[in-house]
Amino acid sequence: MKELFIDACVREDSRTRTLCRAYMDGYWAGKETEIRKRELNQEPLVPLNRERLRQRDRDIAAGSFAPEKYRYAIEFAEAEEILVGAPYWDCSFPALPVKKL
C-alpha cells in the first residue's frame, strides 16, 4: 500500500504531529506500506496565482503532467491512504510562509 502523510504542523513540539505519529505507528504498523512524508515547512511552496492557474489549465488541455511540475498531485493521486496533520488554532489553520517569486 502507498501511504502519504502531509505534515502541515508549524511547531516543533506539535501535538497534532504527535497524534499523527501515534496513528501511523498503530494503524500503518505491520502492514506492507510505502510511507511518503511531506513536511510542508520544508517544501518550496509558492502561491497559486492567475498565471499559474492558466498554465495548469493549458497543461490539462494538453494532457501534460510533467512529474517535476505536478509531483505533489501525482503523489496524492497514487496514495491509497492520506493522513493530513494540520493543527486547528482559534478557528483557523496556521498558514505557512511561501517563497517569494
Image: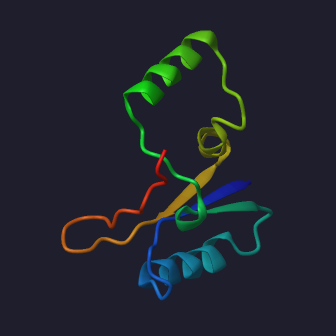
**Residue 59 versus residue 94 in the image, above or below:** above
Q: Quadrant of residue 11?
A: bottom left
Considering every residue shown, the one lying at the far right of the view is 32
Q: Residue at x 76, y 74 (%)?
A: 30
Q: Position of residue 54 (x, y in %)?
A: 44, 20
**Residue 21 versus residue 88 in the image, above or below:** below
| 72 displayed left or right of 35 | left
Q: Residue at x 33, y 67 (%)?
A: 94
Considering every residue shown, the one lying at the far front of the view is 101
Q: Position of residue 25 (x, y in %)?
A: 65, 79
Q: Position of residue 99 (x, y in %)?
A: 49, 54
Q: Which sits in the foreground, 82 or 58?
A: 58
| 35 displayed left or right of 76 | right
Q: Position of residue 10 (x, y in %)?
A: 44, 74
Q: Residue at x 62, y 79 (%)?
A: 26
Q: Quadrant of the N terminus?
A: bottom right
Q: Which sits in the foreground, 59 or 25?
A: 59
Q: Quadrant of residue 6?
A: bottom right
Q: Quadrant of residue 50?
A: top left
Q: Residue at x 61, y 39 (%)?
A: 77
Question: How many numbered discs?
Answer: 0
